[in-house]
Amino acid sequence: MEALAEALPRAGAVAGLDLGTKTIGVAVSDGLRSVATPLKTIKRRKFGLDAEALLAIVAERDLKGLILGLPKNMDGTEGPRCQATRAFARNLEKLTDLPISFWDERLSTVAAERAMLEADMSRAKRAEAIDHVAAGFILQGALDRLRYLGAA
């Protein structure tokens, strides 16, 4: 996160991504990087199409950086899903100059599910929104850290 803080300009929105095997949840921040807002869920197809959809959001919203949720195991170790996330980031770095960083996403989906239950969302609406709401939790955690580092 420190490297991202140094690479980001003083202002400008960033995106948080919850990378799943079937979907990518996307959340964006405001320009001052204080609040994360769930945006949308992208259905995954091939890397090229997924990257194209993400980079379209980057261009449309003039985003300044990307934060990918890193799905660590509960004991803090990294398994195959972390390796897949890091590989996705390496491939994405070849297509954009944006700084890319990672944020520990443990329990973000659980927190998102709990928040939607408390909001009394139906099961169908929760299933539709879970990925981008989880991306919002990932991004908000990263934004709070960036603010602590003086980059937000």
Image (cartoon, rainbow, N blue to C red):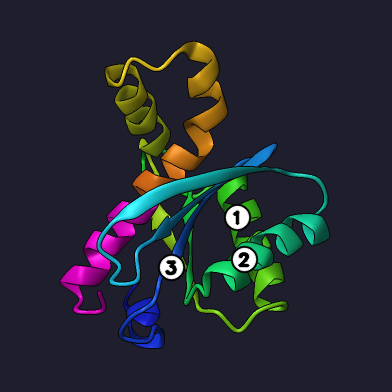
User: Is residue 72 visible in the rendered structure shown here?
Assistant: no
Q: Nearer the viewer, mark 3 or mark 1?
A: 3
CA–CA distance between discs 1 and 2?
6 Å
- Label 1 sits on what residue type? Thr
- x, y (%) of residue 57? 61, 63
- Mark 1 residue crowding within 10 angstroms, few (<14) / some (14–19) / many (20+): many
CA–CA distance between discs 3 and 1?
18 Å
Q: Quadrant of residue 151?
A: bottom left
Please name the residue shown 34% across and 71% down the image.
31
Query: CB of mark 1 within 8 Å of CB of mark 2?
Result: yes
Q: For the view shown, which residue lies furthest in the front direction?
A: 60
Q: Is residue 149 magenta?
A: yes
Q: The C terminus lies in which quarter of the figure?
A: bottom left
Residue corresponding to mark 2 = 89
User: Which element is circle 3 on?
Assistant: loop
Please name the residue shown 35% across and 45% down the image.
137
Left or right of 51 in this view: 16: left
- x, y (%) of residue 141? 29, 54
Q: The N terminus lies in which quarter of the figure?
A: bottom left
Residue corresponding to mark 3 = 14
- x, y (%) of residue 84? 65, 52
User: Which element is circle 2 on?
Assistant: helix
User: Which element is circle 1 on?
Assistant: helix
Q: Which residues are magenta?
A: 139-152
- Label 2 sits on what residue type? Ala
- Mark 2 residue crowding within 10 angstroms, few (<14) / some (14–19) / many (20+): some
Q: Nearer the viewer, mark 3 or mark 2?
A: 3
